[in-house]
Image (cartoon, helix red, strand yellow):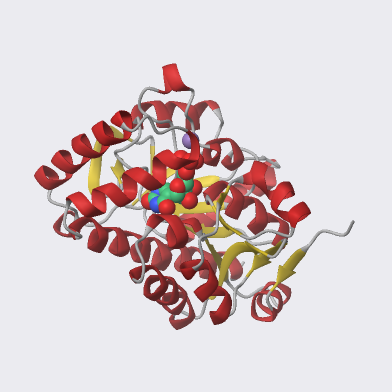
């Protein structure tokens, strides 16, 4: 069987000519944002990159084909159809069945790497869930990031997770974490999770320098760029703390497990904050996409 990987003409020619490309995930569109904001957001994410001279490669699985770069009709499908959330372990099943699905950070990183894309923007990376010492719930985003040479720009990880445990796992998995203009790890809606980082980079060129050194070492793992929102744009911490406590309690009461947990928490927090978290969520994704675009520009200039 030949690999069913379809790279859009725009993405393929950019890669062939060494022009900048940034991968975007689709689970944030299908499971992380409510309709119809999700379709508008997906289009805006792409246009931020296009406007900066970077080619967007939104990644998903459609009819059994791994897609890197979607047409607008395909974006509409991802935003509007009830498709499953696919992590890396689900990819062979989706291919074998000719199925469709939205890709998590793990699956997006995996497919981006198959396509030869080196930079990826997401909202928040998955990580170690609270109570993981009992439930073993740790996102495959972490393990895949330790295996794939991708640079992921994320606003840290969400406060729905166990942040210090996530940072410990990233250390164990030998994934470098670079604070983008900060030495504090962000917790998605909040600028500062309260946890410190070992390394800070001032700009996109410094990230590309680390990518170059990583390649020279022949290392396996990707790189996590932690990019916080400015304090003035973060979610009100009091609103945040209340919504978080309630959402965690509701997930617990409903006995949710596995891949349902993250989408439930994200959408419940949007409801509990009356959409306030949604506006911040979109700003975060856009902020990460801008930085990823700058990194891709710097990387492609080498
Ligand atoms: N964080 C967000 N929005 C999201 C997700 C994480 O801010 O939509 C999604 C991403 O696709 C991430 C996935 O890869 O949740 C992690 O899910 P899990 O915890 O089940 O691995
Ligand atoms: Mn999980």
Judge left or right: residue 21 versus residue 92.
left
Residue at position x 60%, y 41% in the image: 144
Q: Residue furthest front?
A: 254
Above or below residue 210? Residue 259 is: above
Give the image location of residue 248, x and y in percent: 27, 34
In front: 180, or 33? 33
Q: Determine the image quadrant of residue 118.
A: bottom right
Image quadrant where one finds the C terminus: bottom right
Give the image location of residue 94, x and y in percent: 69, 53
Whether residue 271 is visible here, answered yes or no, is yes
Judge left or right: residue 6 versus residue 244.
right
Above or below residue 239? Residue 3 is: below
Give the image location of residue 116, x and y in percent: 70, 61
Judge left or right: residue 259 versus residue 237.
right
Above or below residue 46? Residue 82 is: above
Residue at position x 18%, y 43% in the image: 243
Whether residue 225 is visible here, answered yes or no, is no
């Amino acid at each position: 069987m030949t690999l069913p990987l379809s790279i859009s003409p725009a993405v393929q020619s950019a890669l062939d000519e060494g022009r900048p490309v940034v991968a975007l995930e689709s689970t944030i569109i299908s499971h992380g944002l409510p309709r119809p904001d999700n379709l508008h957001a997906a289009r805006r994410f792409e246009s931020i990159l296009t406007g900066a001279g970077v080619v967007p490669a939104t990644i998903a699985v459609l009819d059994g084909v791994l897609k890197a770069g979607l047409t607008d009709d395909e974006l509409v499908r991802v935003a509007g159809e009830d498709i499953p959330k696919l992590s890396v372990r689900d990819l062979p099943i989706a291919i074998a069945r000719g199925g469709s699905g939205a890709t998590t950070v793990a699956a997006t990183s995996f497919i981006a790497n198959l396509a030869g894309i080196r930079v990826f923007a997401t909202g928040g990376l998955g990580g170690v869930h609270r109570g993981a010492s009992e439930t073993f719930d740790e996102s495959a985003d972490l393990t895949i990031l330790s295996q794939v040479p991708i640079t992921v720009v994320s606003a840290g990880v969400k406060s729905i997770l166990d942040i210090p445990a996530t940072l410990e796992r990233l250390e164990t998995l030998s994934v470098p974490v670079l604070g983008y203009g900060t030495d504090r790890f962000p917790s998605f809606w909040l600028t500062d999770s309260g946890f410190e980082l070992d390394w800070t980079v001032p700009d996109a060129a410094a990230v590309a320098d680390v990518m170059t050194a990583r390649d020279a070492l022949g290392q396996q793992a990707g790189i996590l760029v932690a990019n916080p929102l400015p304090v003035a744009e973060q979610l009100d911490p009091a609103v945040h703390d209340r919504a978080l406590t309630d959402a965690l309690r509701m997930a617990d009461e409903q006995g949710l497990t596995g891949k349902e947990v993250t989408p439930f928490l994200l959408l419940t927090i949007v409801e509990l904050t009356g959409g306030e978290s949604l506006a911040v969520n979109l700003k975060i994704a856009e902020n990460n996409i801008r930085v990823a675009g700058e990194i891709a520009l710097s990387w492609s200039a080498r």
